[in-house]
Amino acid sequence: MSSPRSRPRLVLASGSPRRLALLAQIGVDPDCVLPSESDETPRRGESPRALAQRLASEKASASAAIALKVPDLAPCLTLAADTVVCVGRRMLPKCEILDEAEACLRLLSGRAHRVYTGLALVTPSGATRRRLVETRVRFKRLSREEIDAYLGSGEWRGKAGGYAIQGLAGAFVVRLVGSYTNVVGLPLAETAALLAGEGYYAHRQWLANLLK
């Protein structure tokens, strides 16, 4: 077995605290965080699945290009993810204003929706490995009082679909099929498998982390 020190360097192409926390949950500590921006406007006729995968790939490529210019990082793996929430083919925004969040909650109330996360991993050779993860979620029917209380919490801000399942909105979920961590923002089993395919084994870090 190779030692933890022999693992490839890892760059995370996201500044999301949630994704960093999820990686930490499985003992993965990126060597560097290099967030990248991408125009998240869907292309004409683009499906939610295709959008999630495209944005993840674009973000990974952009951060990998930056990492190549950093001597202490190259060669490295660059990981990116993008999450899209949708009802049918209707994609819900990452809510920044109250009206957006209210519209999302009203739409999701009593209905099923899907959460897609595209994963992209750029290897030291420049190849890109991709995965797409889908989770189905159903909300209970929300009362006016519940919607108002959730909006008042401010927890919806910056969240795709206007809610955070790991927070107060967990009380709204009556059914979930698939990966829970996918809905939070990073499907952990699939991410660990993607990394392992390129020689970065999360489980080999566990004992090393305990000894720190």
Image (tube, rainbow, N blue to C red):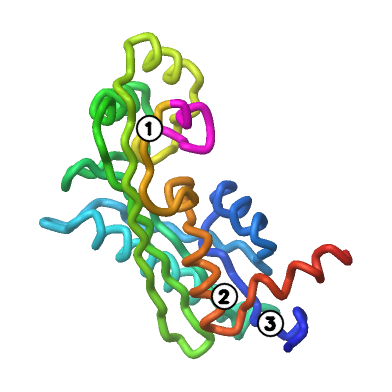
Element under disc 3: loop
Q: Which mark is residue 67?
A: 2
Q: Residues within 10 Å of mark 3 (few under 14, many from 20)?
A: some
**Quarter of the image that includes the C terminus:** bottom right
Q: Measured from the top left, where is residue 139 in percent x and y?
A: 33, 31
Task: Give the percent coordinates (x, y) of residue 138.
Answer: 31, 36
Q: Tell me how far mark 1 sits from mark 2, CA to CA.
A: 42 Å
Residue 148 versus residue 10 in the image, above or below? above
Which quarter of the picture shows residue 8?
A: bottom right
The quadrant holding residue 112 is top left
Check residue 7 in the rendering and tell me which mark sits there, or answer none: 3
Q: Residue 100: where, in percent of width, then height?
A: 30, 28
Please, which residue is most extreme toward the top here? 145
For marks 3 and 2, the one nearer the N-term is 3
User: Where is mark 1, residue-wise?
Assistant: 174
Q: Nearer the viewer, residue 3 or 18?
A: 3
Frontmost of labels 1 and 2 is: 1
Mark 3 vs mark 2: in front: 3
